Amino acid sequence: MISNQNTLQRGFSFIEMMFVLVLMGILMTMVGPRVMGLLGRGKTTTTKNTLKVTQQGLKQYKMDCGKYPERLEDLLKKPEGASNWQGPYAGNEDSGVLELPKDGWDNDLVYKLTPGANPPYELYSNGDPEKEEDRIYASK
């Protein structure tokens, strides 16, 4: 006598697999936006910290040279005619390559001298490139 037990295969039915896939889809729609929001906040926090460090470099440059730099690149290389320049005031010296800091999205910071303002410059990041008007300003 031959038993049918050996011919039956173990596994999940199509309905069970569909149920699990639907459940996973529901969970991803609930959790996905929150996870993406956390990633965006991390880049924003990184950008704010980069702006603070760059702002400190600008203040140190002013203390040494008596005025704010004309452009951010002056924080890395001594501009012509700058006396008492003690830089570099920005960049990572440990790597051997001095580069201006970038925001959390790996974009350049924006620096504009605005005489008469307090402080007499604007320093900001354009923020997330996928969002319109998402500037992140250095604190004043």
Image (spheres, helix red, strand yellow):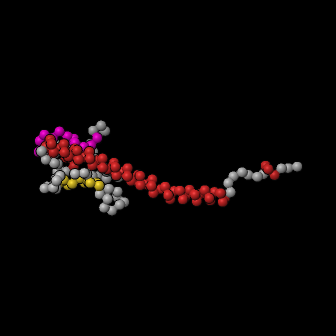
Magenta residues span 81-92
Total label count?
A: 0
Question: Is residue 31 left or right of 22 when viewed as pictured?
Answer: left
Question: Which image quarter: residue 134?
Answer: bottom left
Question: Is residue 118 left or right of 104 when viewed as pictured?
Answer: left
Q: Residue furthest top?
A: 94
Task: Residue at 21%, 41% (x, y): give it.
Answer: 88
Q: Main secondary structure of the magenta part?
A: loop
Find residue 135 and report its horizontal and vertical position in percent.
Answer: 29, 57
Indicate yes or no whether the magenta region holds residue 66: no
Note whether 62 is above or below 121 in the view shown: above
Task: Residue at 66%, 60% (x, y): give it.
Answer: 15
Visible residue check, residue 118: yes
Find residue 69 and report its horizontal and vertical position in percent.
Answer: 17, 48
Find residue 4 and report its horizontal and vertical position in percent.
Answer: 81, 52
Task: Residue at 11%, 41% (x, y): give it.
Answer: 83
Task: Residue at 29%, 47% (x, y): give it.
Answer: 50
Visible residue check, residue 100: no
